[in-house]
Structure formats: structure tokens, C-alpha cells
Image: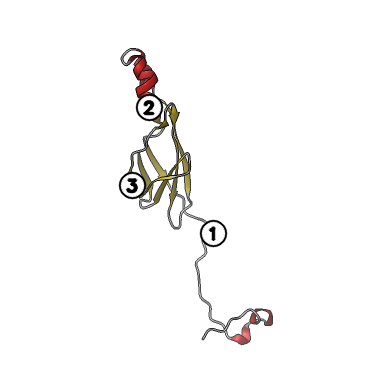
Amino acid sequence: MTVNTNPNGAKVEVTDKSGATVFEGISPTTMYLKSGSGFFSKQSYTLKLTMNGYESKTIPVNCSVNGWYFGNILFGGLIGILIVDPATGAMYRLDKEALNETLEKKENQTQASLEIKDIKDISPSLISNLVKIN
């Protein structure tokens, strides 16, 4: 699977259906994801895209039955249908091969600032919260 973001440089984190992290990287990136998770069991993933100053995105990636799996009826026989493809995960295919996502800038972002005040300009209730630094 290929992941591209606009802008480039987003952190890409992929977790499987059990919650285990299976991939971490920076976009643009390409990764290999297994479509099966055991005998007759398909895998699913969650991609999380994060970048400073931008909204995070979470994208589900599921697997579905590969149409060629039914080709075993003609070419692979029962061994392909009941043993090989279910055991290797070849009976499933990712529903997305490439992902192109645009990240939105965060709104209402406040910048940290430093303001110097004379102690005479601070209210008595705030003065009680001051801590002396040596």
C-alpha cells in the first residue's frame, strides 16, 4: 500500500485489528500489509496520519474476498479453496492499494507567548499563586 499526503511529511502509523502497531513511517511511503490474519480470517487495519499544525486523520483499511479466490474452482481445485489460499491469506485483498489524503490545517491555533508585567500590575489573587524562582 502506498500513502501520500498533502503536505508531505506526515507521520503514518498503522495498527492491525488487535491494536498492534505494524508500521510507522513518514509520507510519502510504501508498506506491505498482509490481507489474512490466520486460517479463513481476514485482517483489517487503521491508518493514522498526524502532522504538527494539521488535523489528524484516521482511515480504516479492510480486506475483502479476492475475486480470483473463486478461480480455484477452475484452476486450483479443493486444495486451493480449502487449504492454500485460506492459510496464506491469498483469498483476501486490501480494499485500498493507494491512499492520497489532504491534511487540513488546525483552526484556532494559539501561539505561546511571553508577557512581562510589573508585580504592581498583577491582582492580589494572582500574586498568591506566584512561585519564587532562584
Q: Are marks 3 and 1 in contact (CB under 8 Å)?
A: no
Residue 71: image location, x then y, percent: 35, 16
Percent of width and height locating residue 3: 36, 43
Q: Residue at x 47, y 47 (%)?
A: 57
Q: Spatial distance from mark 2 to mark 1, Cα to Cα?
A: 50 Å
Q: Nearer the viewer, mark 2 or mark 3?
A: 2
Cα–Cα span, label 3 and label 1: 28 Å
According to the picture, the residue beneath numbered tag 3 turns out to be 28
Kind of residue at disc 3: Pro
Judged left or right of residue 132, residue 62 is left
Q: Quadrant of the N terminus?
A: top left
Observer-nearest of 20 and 124: 20
In the rendered structure, find residue 33 and report the number of the disc placed on it. Answer: none
Secondary structure at badge 1 equals loop
Q: Amino acid at mark 2?
A: Ala
N-term mark: 3 or 1: 3
Q: Provide the residue designation for mark 2.
A: 87
Q: Earlier in the sequence, mark 2 or mark 1?
A: 2
Tag 3, which secondary structure? loop
Looking at the rendered structure, the kind of residue marked 1 is: Asn
Distance between the alpha carbons at the discs numbered 2 and 3: 32 Å
Q: Which mark is residue 108?
A: 1
Extreme residue toward the top, this view:
74
